[in-house]
Image: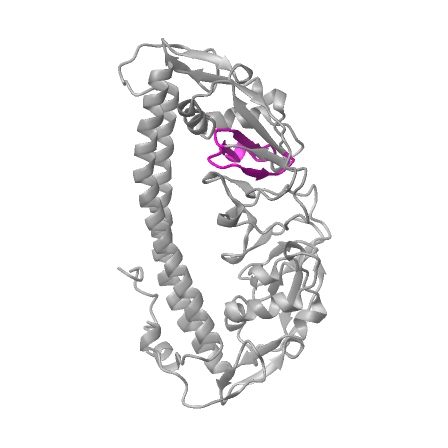
Amino acid sequence: MIANLPRYPAYKPSGVDWLGDMPAHWEVRRGKTILKPVDFRSQTGQEELLTVSSERGVVPRKLANVTMFKAESYVGYKLCWKDDLVINSLWAWAQGLGVSQHHGIVSSAYGVYRLLSTGEASPRFIHYLVRSSPFQWELQVRSKGIWVSRLKLTDEAFLRAPFPLPPLPEQRAIARYLDHVDQRIQRYIDAKEQLIARLQEARQSIIQRAVTRGLDPDVPLKPSGVDWLEDVPAHWEVRRGKTLLKPVDIRSQTGEEELLTVSSERGVVPRKSASVTMFKAESYIGHKLCWPGDLVINSLWAWARGLGVSRYHGIVSTAYGVYRLLSESKDYSQFIHYLVRSVPFQWELQVRSKGIWISRLQLTNTAFLEASLPVPPLAELRAIAAHLDKATAAIDSAIHNARRQAERMAEYRASLIAHVVTGKLDVRAAAAALSPEPAEQVPVGR
């Protein structure tokens, strides 16, 4: 699609590093000549609760994956209206902003901005511009803080930012074209995400069946005496975690070992391969160590699959729990990995975790080691682990392919938006050729 779009006939220097040359008839304006900060507060706290998503902009909180606790009252919180620009000042540089399509309540720490004149700027054009990758660079430069996850964008810094601005009819044409393309691309991405969700459900179902019932569908069963486990094969044992695992606490003397983290999707992985935005410590001397075969648990996120058996030797957080199998069997550790990350056991971990709200539930060593685990005979345990390795590998490959296809389409969308809102591509004719009816319900790439 990018290849079919022309450049503008004439360009001029913009004087802005991230913008480069821009169409000759565009202008560069400071944000303060386009937007003004507004601060209206809720009198009742009953308006729609909104949040800012890096993926989708301003959305109703009930539609977003938010684990932070809710306030007792939202009286005094900021209000925004449709077409207001809302910015999470700590995450502006990571697409934590967008023009709202909703009236509602946002955090009192957010910035809310309103167009000075609807005759000069299109809200939708501004939405695409401020969330584009070139403008994100500008916001990161203007945000200040001691580490990347605490960079803060002030009103003053934001309103000094340069905005490339086409004439209003052209802004509207650009926004209309990008809305059309965005809808098509989003349908494609949504279809891939639905496929991934179905594959993940199938994966969990296979694991759950194998670690609680084994591989023989006709095996005789007996009551386990454990709520989350229900019936188990009659020849299996049910044992407390403390009879299988022991906590270990060995610390790094150099801080030079591989830095590891716990991913809800993949278990224990090298931090460099994970999407982690938290700051790095000045030194990792004194941090905990784990070895291959050790079970590592993020005690605050154990209930959300924040645990797994490590395949690596390295450093983990001092707040993590590290457990070592009393049995030295490698196959035993792989079975434990599948078991503790299974859906039923996640329920058990949530029950055993304690805290005042869900994002701060903490699992102690004692609580975890008191949990009941199903234990097959060693030969059967090995067979189950081997079966799951093979079955999950095939599903994981399909998930990886679907996720990569969705990521490539998202990357394409970001590139297209960046080229269009900075004037590198001319979409005026393409926008004029769009049907006035809604875009055809066919995903891009099909």
Q: Residue at x 58, y 29 (%)?
A: 322
Tell me where residue 347 appears, x and y as whole percent. Answer: 50, 27
> Does residue 402 appear to the left or right of 65 in the view shown?
left
The answer to whether residue 253 is above or below residue 17 is above
Q: Residue at x 69, y 48 (%)?
A: 74
Name the one closer to the observer, 339 or 28: 339
Q: Quadrant of the C terminus?
A: bottom left
Name the one closer to the observer, 310 or 170: 310
Tell me where residue 135 appears, x and y as whole percent. Answer: 55, 70
Is residue 166 something that shows in the picture? no
Residue 314 forms part of the magenta stretch: yes
Name the one closer to the observer, 90 or 324: 324
Which residues are the magenta region?
Answer: 292-319
Q: Quadrant of the N terminus?
A: bottom left
Tell me where residue 118 appears, x and y as whole percent. Answer: 57, 77
The answer to whether residue 131 is above or below residue 307 is below
Q: Quadrant of residue 380?
A: top left
The answer to whether residue 305 is above or below residue 165 is above
Residue 408 forms part of the magenta stretch: no
> Does residue 231 appear to the left or right of 60 in the view shown?
left
Tell me where residue 188 appears, x and y as whole percent. Answer: 34, 56
Is residue 216 something that shows in the picture? yes
